[in-house]
């Protein structure tokens, strides 16, 4: 199993206990591979204690915060099982569903995708932003992104190896496997609220991307982000002025005509900056590695890997 973590100290102990309670009775050889994505709340120290007491636990520490997709790629590169399950570290994905995923894999599925029936504990604004972004990416790149996709999935070892995940520069695991066309089984489940703590990925990261993924010299991306924020500010200011103009004017809708120009320019600035930011990111990804592992702890022994770029 591959579980990316970013500041999940409050839920880590409970998650580990639940995973062991579900997997151990199955009587199968297993490995719990935790990938720390630059946590600063004590998650690393807690992982060290767990790995020292359980030889089935492997800990991968990234050099800094690279983002969840990069953490997943790092974990999948280290995983060696015949089947690999990925899930978030907040217990919104129920470990009780793992036996069903393994059953589908034994019946021939290359990829088992868990689809949530309803996103529990998620704000409507965040869910709407995520769905809109998926629709835009699907329309632009024609990747067939599944609706309400999550990272709770099972991959056959051959599927991971065939795609060469480490060398890929795409940011979405779901889009990658959808594009490849592996045999897929979909299992619906009800996603739970977070067991503890607060989400580390908010609506700004959904729209603007993870700040930890930007290289220090990525000035172009910084300029594009500024353009996006300025465009949003123009649109919001235009809407606010329109509301006040309609409320205090007898001209009605005619008073809205001067608002259309700044609102349209703000929208164009936001969209062009958004596109430019992602073009700059694609260029950066073609020149730089996706993640860097600074330490790998496996089976009660710690192997120090200094600046190992993958």
Image (spheres, rainbow, N blue to C red):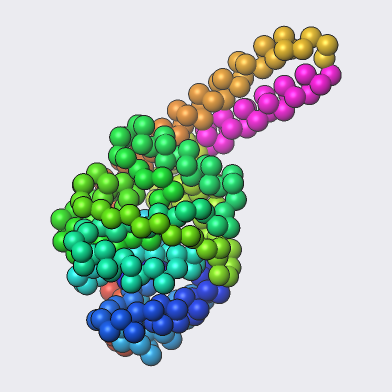
Q: Is 60 above or below relative to 256?
A: below
Residue drawn at 59 percent across, 44 percent down: 125
In percent of width and height, residue 105 lies at 24, 64
Dividing the image into 4 quarters, which one contains the N terminus?
bottom left
In percent of width and height, residue 84 lies at 27, 67
Nearest to the observer: residue 253 or residue 205: 253
Dividing the image into 4 quarters, which one contains the C terminus?
bottom left
- Residue 98's quadrant in the figure? bottom left
- Residue 50's quadrant in the figure? bottom left
Is residue 300 visible to us here?
A: yes
Magenta-drawn segment? 226-248
Is residue 38 visible to us here?
A: no
Nearest to the observer: residue 187 or residue 171: 187
In percent of width and height, residue 191 lies at 49, 60
Majority SS type along the magenta span: helix
Tell me if residue 227 is in the magenta stretch: yes
Nearest to the observer: residue 47 or residue 130: 130
Q: Is 96 above or below relative to 169?
A: below
Residue drawn at 45 percent across, 34 percent down: 274
Tell me if residue 126 is in the magenta stretch: no
Q: How many numbered discs?
A: 0
Residue drawn at 60 percent across, 50 percent down: 123
Is 172 positioned to the left or the right of 225 in the image?
Answer: left
Is 309 positioned to the left or the right of 253 in the image?
Answer: left
Residue drawn at 55 percent across, 70 percent down: 195
In percent of width and height, residue 296 lies at 31, 76
Nearest to the observer: residue 293 or residue 1: 1
């Amino acid at each position: 199993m591959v579980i990316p973590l970013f500041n999940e100290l409050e839920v880590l102990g409970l998650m580990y206990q639940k995973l062991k309670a579900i997997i151990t009775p199955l009587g199968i050889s297993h490995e719990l591979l935790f990938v720390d994505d630059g946590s600063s709340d004590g998650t690393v120290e807690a992982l060290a204690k767990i790995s020292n007491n359980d030889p089935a636990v492997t800990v991968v520490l990234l050099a800094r915060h690279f983002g969840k997709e990069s953490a997943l790629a790092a974990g999948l590169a280290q995983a060696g099982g015949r089947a690999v399950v990925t899930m978030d570290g907040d217990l919104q994905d129920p470990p009780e569903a793992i036996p069903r995923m393994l059953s589908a894999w034994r019946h021939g599925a290359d990829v088992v995708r868990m689809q949530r029936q309803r996103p529990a504990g998620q704000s409507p604004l965040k869910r709407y932003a995520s769905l809109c972004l998926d629709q835009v990416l699907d329309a632009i790149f024609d990747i067939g992104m599944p609706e309400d996709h999550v990272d709770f999935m099972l991959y056959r070892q051959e599927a991971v190896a065939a795609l060469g995940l480490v060398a890929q520069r795409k940011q979405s695991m779901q889009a990658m496997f959808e594009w490849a066309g592996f045999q897929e089984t979909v299992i619906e489940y009800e996603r739970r609220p977070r067991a503890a703590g607060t989400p580390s990925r908010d609506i700004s990261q959904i729209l603007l991307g993870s700040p930890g993924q930007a290289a220090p010299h990525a000035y172009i991306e910084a300029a594009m982000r500024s353009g996006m924020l300025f465009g949003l500010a123009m649109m919001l200011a235009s809407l606010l002025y329109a509301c006040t103009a309609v409320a205090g004017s007898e001209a009605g809708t005619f008073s809205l005509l001067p608002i259309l120009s700044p609102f349209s320019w703000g929208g164009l600035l936001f969209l062009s900056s958004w596109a430019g930011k992602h073009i700059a990111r694609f260029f950066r990804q073609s020149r730089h590695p996706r993640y860097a592992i600074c330490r790998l702890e496996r089976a009660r022994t710690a192997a120090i890997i200094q600046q190992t770029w993958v």
